[in-house]
Image: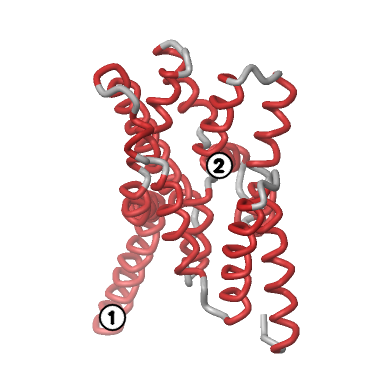
């Protein structure tokens, strides 16, 4: 009787200890995902250094104050939209023209949101709102590159997005202060970092012949339209490349 009683006690203690371990693990997982997201985003943050410096310097050279320049990067948080907005402001464009231009430039975020919807829609509002604000081309590419979609936790997405947000504002702030000491930063062609950034995003996603064909078609078609001075050349070429990619995928009978 004593032996059986001891065995039962040991089993209970072992079960209690194992249950306590399983209860402790989920508490650490949000922070683990958060730091993992920040770590994985760092390479893309490095590639955007010149872009952020350019955005900050152009803001000052366009006549914005220090507070307005900082606020533009902190609130708008969209590199291409910031540069286009500053260019339109300098040319005297109306507010309506600026809003429409920014809308079409950032329209791809609708597709990003729809793609990530199945992972984000089940989350609470306090998670969805910051993820929506921090959603960029870089965060979307990082999410798509994850083979294990179970790792796309709120902590991971917010950590990756926050890392890029902080780096973007830091580099923009650096550009704001550099604008007063190094004039005409545009002559250093820092805007090439935009091309380099999107190359690092697109290339890892080319895993099928149809995608490769779509990228090549978009590249040469955009060059042709730009040479012919067609407005919206990049947007037209991008949409055309997607249709061409779908055509090649159906022709080759690729599996989705």
Q: Nearer the viewer, residue 217 or 1?
A: 217
> Hey, which quadrant is residue 190 in on the image?
top left
Q: Which residue, as the protein is rendered here, is positioned at the far front?
A: 228
Quadrant including the C terminus? bottom right
- For mark 1, give the secondary structure: helix
Residue 111 locus on image (x, y percent): 68, 53
The residue depicted at 64 percent of the width and 17 percent of the height is: 92
Q: Is residue 219 visible?
A: yes
Q: Which residue, as the protein is rendered here, is positioned at the far bottom?
A: 253
Residue 32 locus on image (x, y percent): 34, 54
Position of residue 250 in the picture relative to residue 38 (left or right): right
- For mark 2, give the secondary structure: helix
Q: Nearer the viewer, residue 235 or 36?
A: 235
> Hey, which quadrant is residue 184 in on the image?
top left
Residue 16 locus on image (x, y percent): 34, 65
The residue depicted at 46 percent of the width and 62 percent of the height is: 151
Q: Is residue 27 visible?
A: no
Residue annotated with mark 1: 7
Residue annotated with mark 2: 127
The residue depicted at 70 percent of the width and 44 percent of the height is: 231
Residue 142 locus on image (x, y percent): 46, 58
Q: Nearer the viewer, residue 220 or 117?
A: 220
Position of residue 69 in the picture relative to residue 6 (left or right): right
């Amino acid at each position: 009787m004593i032996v059986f009683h001891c065995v039962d006690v040991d089993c209970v203690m072992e079960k209690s200890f194992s249950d306590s371990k399983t209860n402790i693990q989920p508490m650490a997982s949000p922070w683990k995902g958060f730091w993992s997201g920040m770590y994985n985003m760092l390479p893309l943050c490095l590639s955007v250094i010149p872009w952020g410096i350019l955005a900050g310097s152009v803001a000052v050279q366009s006549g914005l104050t220090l507070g307005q320049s900082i606020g533009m990067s902190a609130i708008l948080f969209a590199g291409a939209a910031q540069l286009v907005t500053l260019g339109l402001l300098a040319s005297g464009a109306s507010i309506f023209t600026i809003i429409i231009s920014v809308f079409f430039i950032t329209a791809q975020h609708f597709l990003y949101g729809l793609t990530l919807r199945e992972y984000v829609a089940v989350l609470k509002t306090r998670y969805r709102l910051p993820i929506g604000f921090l959603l960029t081309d870089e965060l979307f590419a990082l999410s798509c590159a994850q083979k294990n979609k179970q790792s796309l936790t709120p902590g991971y997405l917010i950590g990756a997005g926050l890392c890029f947000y902080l780096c973007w504002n830091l580099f923009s702030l650096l550009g704001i202060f550099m604008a007063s000491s190094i004039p005409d930063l545009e002559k250093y062609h820092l805007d090439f970092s935009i091309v380099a950034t999107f190359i690092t995003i697109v290339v890892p996603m080319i895993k099928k012949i149809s995608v490769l064909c779509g990228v090549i078609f978009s590249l040469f078609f955009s060059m042709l339209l730009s040479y012919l001075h067609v407005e919206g050349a990049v947007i037209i070429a991008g949409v055309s490349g997607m249709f061409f990619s779908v055509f090649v995928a159906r022709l080759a009978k690729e599996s989705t």
